[in-house]
Every structure is written in structure tokens, then in C-alpha cells.
Image: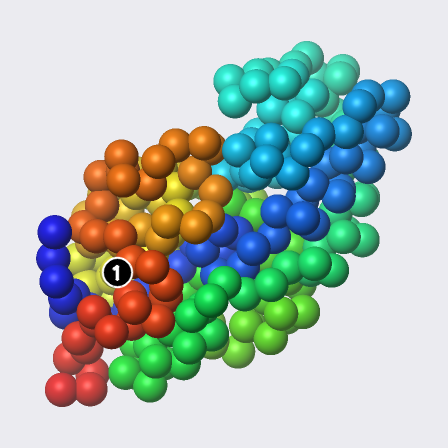
């Protein structure tokens, strides 16, 4: 595992990396379930279902498992309900993880180009970052519905690198889940993981990453940038 990273850009995941958003997601998920006559889920179950975007979360909540998929006639009205409820809940309880703001400040001070690459739908990602006073740090936000494919596909990572004008190998990815690790590896980027987010119930130490950092502040301390000499 690398001790330090000589890069020009950092691509950060949102939910589970920058912000603890599971309470908002659980509120919207449970409002959807109750509206459909189902029992609500506990916070830990919803947290385990987070990671591959809103649609997968809805399938998992309806079907009761990580691999669950429900028929379209069941999924579509539930998805519409989730989106309606999440519009209301998004950002109400979200809080930055310890060291997240300090890490962003330190990265920006090093002259690094920052992008947020998330599986959250674009309009919700933009609104959340604004509400939590983080939008100002990012030159680019790539939502889960902005492109044809989302993480763990490498397309969003490569797109972000291209938009920032930085070679993929000069971009450090930071996330909390297997989706982040797979996307970064396939895009040819070094990747760090944080241990406190949402990894579908898996131990973050199982991931193929270049290191695990306790916070984004610690991650910033491991980055060297040519832009600052």
C-alpha cells in the first residue's frame, strides 16, 4: 500500500464518504414502504442497502435483500414515491464525517482539482452539497444518472478525469465501498477507502484499495501535488 500519492485531482464519493446521509435515506425509504402498506426498516438495514444508487436501494427495500429485484409494476410506483419523499428529506439530517471539511480545505490548499462522483441522482447530489455547504469545493459533480453507466463501471471516473483535464493515473479516488474501489481500479486510478461509510455490510479491509484512511483529513496529508511543488 502506498504511503503517499503524487496526483493533481481527487475524485470523492458522496454518501458514506463526505456525508453521513443514511438517516435521510432511511426516512425516505420508510415513507415509501409505509405508503405502500409495508413495514419500515431499521437504520442498519437501510445502511446495508445503500451504495449502488436510488433504484437499487428501492429494489432492495422492497425485496428484502442485497440481490433483490422486484417486478416493474411493483418497482415503478415505489420508485416514484421514494423520489418524492427524498426530495423532502434530502439533507435534513445529513452531517459531514469527522475530518471531511478539514480534508477538503487541505486538498484545495494544495491546488488539487476536486470532483464529487456519486451514484446519487444528479439533482439530489447538487442539492445535498449546497445544503451542507460543500458545493464550493468541487469543480465538478457527476451524479448517478448523468451518464449511461454508474459506479462500479469506470465511466463516471473517466468522465470526471476528462472534464478536469487530468490523466486518470493522476487522479486519486476516495470512497467507502466496493463500487468505488472497482470503478477506480477499472479507470486506472489509485484509490483510498474510508472505514466509516456504507459498504453493503462488507468489511472495508476486504476491498482492493491502496490504503484505508480514518478521515479525509488523513487522506489529504498523504497527497503530494505537482501544482504546489
Crowding at dot 1, Cα within 10 Å, few <14 / some 14-19 / many 20+, comes out as many
Is residue 47 shown left or right of residue 123? left
Is residue 67 shown left or right of residue 39? left
The total number of labels drawn is 1
Q: Helix or strand or loop: what does disc 1 sit on? A: strand
Look at 53% across and 78% down and name the residue there: 136
Is residue 176 shown left or right of residue 59? left
Q: The C terminus is located in which quarter?
A: bottom left
Kindly indicate the quadrant of the structure image that contains residue 213: bottom left
| 95 is higher (above) or lower (below) than 59 | below
Compare residues 171 and 104 and report the one nearer the observer.
Answer: 104
Image location of residue 177, percent across then percent down? 39, 42
Look at 26% across and 60% down and name the residue there: 172
Q: Which residue is mark 1?
A: 172
Image location of residue 28, percent across then percent down? 75, 42
Look at 71% across and 30% down and name the residue there: 41
Can residue 122 be seen here? The reply is no
Can residue 60 be seen here? The reply is yes
Look at 33% across and 86% down and name the residue there: 109
Compare residues 198 and 160 and report the one nearer the observer.
Answer: 198
Amino acid at each position: 500500500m502506498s504511503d503517499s500519492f503524487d496526483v493533481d485531482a481527487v475524485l470523492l464519493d458522496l454518501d458514506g464518504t463526505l456525508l453521513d446521509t443514511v438517516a435521510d435515506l432511511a426516512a425516505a425509504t420508510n415513507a415509501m414502504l409505509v405508503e405502500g402498506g409495508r413495514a419500515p426498516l431499521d437504520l442498519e438495514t437501510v445502511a446495508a442497502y445503500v451504495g449502488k444508487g436510488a433504484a437499487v436501494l428501492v429494489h432492495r427495500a422492497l425485496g428484502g435483500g442485497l440481490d433483490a429485484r422486484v417486478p416493474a409494476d411493483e418497482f415503478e410506483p415505489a420508485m416514484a414515491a421514494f423520489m418524492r419523499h427524498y426530495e423532502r428529506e434530502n439533507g435534513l439530517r445529513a452531517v459531514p464525517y469527522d475530518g471531511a471539511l478539514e480534508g477538503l480545505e487541505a486538498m484545495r490548499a494544495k491546488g488539487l482539482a476536486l470532483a464529487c462522483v456519486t451514484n446519487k441522482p444528479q439533482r439530489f447530489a447538487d442539492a445535498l452539497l449546497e445544503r451542507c455547504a460543500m458545493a464550493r469545493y468541487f469543480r465538478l459533480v457527476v451524479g448517478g444518472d448523468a451518464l449511461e453507466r454508474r459506479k462500479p463501471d469506470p465511466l463516471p471516473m473517466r468522465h470526471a478525469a476528462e472534464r478536469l483535464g487530468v490523466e486518470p493515473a493522476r487522479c486519486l479516488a476516495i470512497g467507502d465501498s466496493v463500487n468505488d474501489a472497482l470503478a477506480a481500479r477499472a479507470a486506472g486510478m489509485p484509490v483510498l477507502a474510508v472505514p466509516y461509510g456504507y459498504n453493503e455490510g462488507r468489511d472495508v479491509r476486504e476491498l482492493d484499495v491502496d490504503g484505508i484512511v480514518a478521515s479525509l483529513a488523513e487522506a489529504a496529508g498523504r497527497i503530494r501535488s505537482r501544482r504546489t511543488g
